[in-house]
Amino acid sequence: MATSALFSQSISANFQTDMEGWTSHQTTVEWANLFAPMNDRGGISFARENADENDAFLFIQKELLELLPNARYRITFNTSWLAWLETTAFPISVHVGAMNEFPTETIEITLDYEIKVLDDDGETVLKTVHPVENRTKIRFNNENFVVAGQLTPNENGLAFTQNINNFDNAFYVNTNDEGRLFLMIGIETENPKIENVFLNTLRIVLREVPKTQEVQEDEKIEEDEEKTEENKVEEDSKEMSSRT
């Protein structure tokens, strides 16, 4: 008996002129022109003056409405960032995820994760970050929400571009009866103030997998797919790097 082909979809954005359908309920997360000398184009700016319960976790989301209903998808994100951080700044963790229902009430992260910080002696150490009550967070779990990487200040305090992806940590999400998913990208850091942090480009691949399939992939297919996606984002990143 012949089997039907599995569905796949890719989503790309370069945010040169607007947010391209991505939204945020936070007023400090918005489309903006990049800082000079790249202010002839834009990106999605993640900013805040001070961390409080309204913006402890900064994120954007995009609703997909035309996926297959009650289907299981493997999702990978490949993102390119432009940032200008003080050399003493804490790293910024980049989160990616998806869910089939977006909560309307206060929500919270339900997993711990580690970030690299400097101790009193200036040595880099790992610190475990725990969910904090009374902060606006996203209720995800380890299956469909991951820390893809970190934006880390460079030693010279200069602007830098950085690619961040979850190729080594793909997650799996089921759509609902309507074939709906919310894609999420967010940042979190111990820096009270955030500025000059831009999401430049992204490419997301959603690949349907059988619901009965264990979370194991054909390594050759996965390697080829992810290398292709990485190259596409790196092309944009190289262009930005040549201008910093």
Image (cartoon, grey):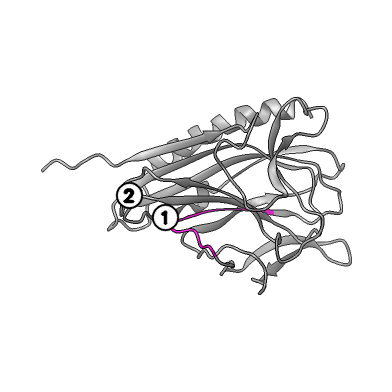
x and y percentages locating residue 58 in the rendered image: 67, 54
Residue furthest to the left: 1
N-terminal-most mark, 1 or 2: 1
x and y percentages locating residue 102 in the rendered image: 49, 58
Q: Which quarter of the picture shows residue 117?
A: bottom right
x and y percentages locating residue 111 in the rendered image: 57, 68
**Residue drawn where x is 88% and y is 67% of the image:** 120
Q: Nearer the viewer, residue 75 or 197?
A: 197
Q: In this view, does 139 lie above or below 66?
A: below
C-alpha gap between disc 1 and disc 2: 9 Å
x and y percentages locating residue 146 in the rendered image: 55, 57
Q: Is residue 166 above or below residue 42?
A: below
Identity of the amino acid at label 1? Tyr
Which SS class for mark 1? strand
**Residue drawn where x is 66% and y is 64% of the image:** 114
Numbered mark located on residue 172 in the image:
1
Identity of the amino acid at label 2? Val
User: What segment carries the magenta color?
Assistant: 93-104
Report the side of 155 relative to 218 (left or right): right
Q: In which quarter of the image is the N terminus?
A: top left
Residue denoted by label 2: 209
Mark 1, Cα crowd under 10 Å, few <14 / some 14-19 / many 20+, is many
